[in-house]
Image: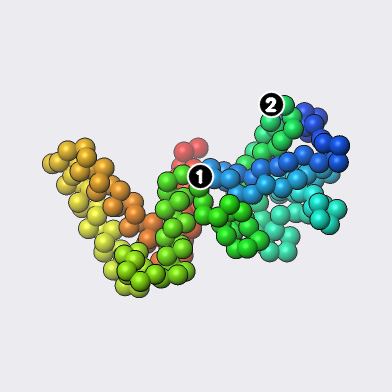
Amino acid sequence: MPPPPTQNWIEAVRFGDDGLVPVVAQSALAGEVLMVGYADREALERTRATGQAHYHSRSRSALWRKGETSGHTQAVAEVRVDCDGDAVLYVVRQRGPACHTGAPTCFGAPAGGTLARLAGTVAERARTRPAGSYTAQLLEAGVAKIAQKVGEEAVETVVAATAEDDARLASEAADLLYHLVVLLEAKQLPLDRVLEELERRAR
């Protein structure tokens, strides 16, 4: 579905002498910056027409759609133009990693928010399984054990909410969120799926 900005937003863009404008891709769900590319008028027009992020490859001097070979597409939820018109923001729903290296973003681990960073750290622990890592130990114990821990932390959060102070509640809630993120990783369910569901319910 094409993105919903006003009809003439492309007219607000000030292209450089090379006919290009920088484009920042940002996650619509977690808010992190995923990558930076360039677009010419044709790329912006294709993005508007299709709802899929298009860019201009400076190395190949060609139009390209994000994910056309990797399958890691970007569905564009919104387009914004910088106040001076010399940069464009694609707010996207990223499918798979944004970076060609396989990293979640071209800047390394997600940095858009605490939960996104936590999910990135947990995913890294799942890949490397460093010695002494509590996260790695949990993942090796399996889904049933992690789910049990989530249940325990949920009970402790309820107790803290009803019988203890705010500091204790914050601590127990943090434990609950952490173990929930580990459970999502164990089930290979991206955090974005949960954020999408929350966004759907908020409509």
**Residue 72 location, x and y as percent?**
65, 59
Question: Mark 2 falls on what kind of element?
Answer: loop
Q: Mark number for residue 3?
A: none
Residue at x 42% of width, y 53% of height: 118
**Please, which colouring scheme is shown?**
rainbow
Residue beneath the point at 61% across and 54% down: 106
Q: Amino acid at mark 1?
A: Gly
- In this picture, is 17 found above or below 53? above
Q: Is residue 26 left or right of residue 133?
A: right
Q: Is residue 126 left or right of residue 103?
A: left
Number of residues whose C-alpha sits closer than 10 Å to that of mark 1, classed few (under 14), some (14–19) or many (20 or more): some
Along the viewing direction, whichever of 48 and 70 lies nearer the viewer: 70
> Would you place residue 171 above or below residue 179 in this image?
above
Q: Quadrant of the N terminus?
A: top right
Residue drawn where x is 22% and y is 43% of the image: 169
Cα separation, mark 1 vs mark 2, equals: 22 Å
Residue 113 location (% of width, % of height)? 46, 44
Q: In the rendered image, is residue 188 in sight?
A: yes
Query: Looking at the picture, how far across and down is residue 168, in whole percent?
Result: 20, 43
Q: How many marks?
A: 2
Residue depicted at x 45% and y 51%: 117
Residue pointed to by mark 2: 83
Q: Quadrant of residue 142?
A: bottom left
According to the picture, the residue beneath numbered tag 1 turns out to be 112
- Type of the residue with mark 2: Cys
Q: Position of residue 148 (x, y in %)?
A: 26, 64
- Specify whether 146 is left or right of 98: left
Helix, strand or loop at label 1? It is loop
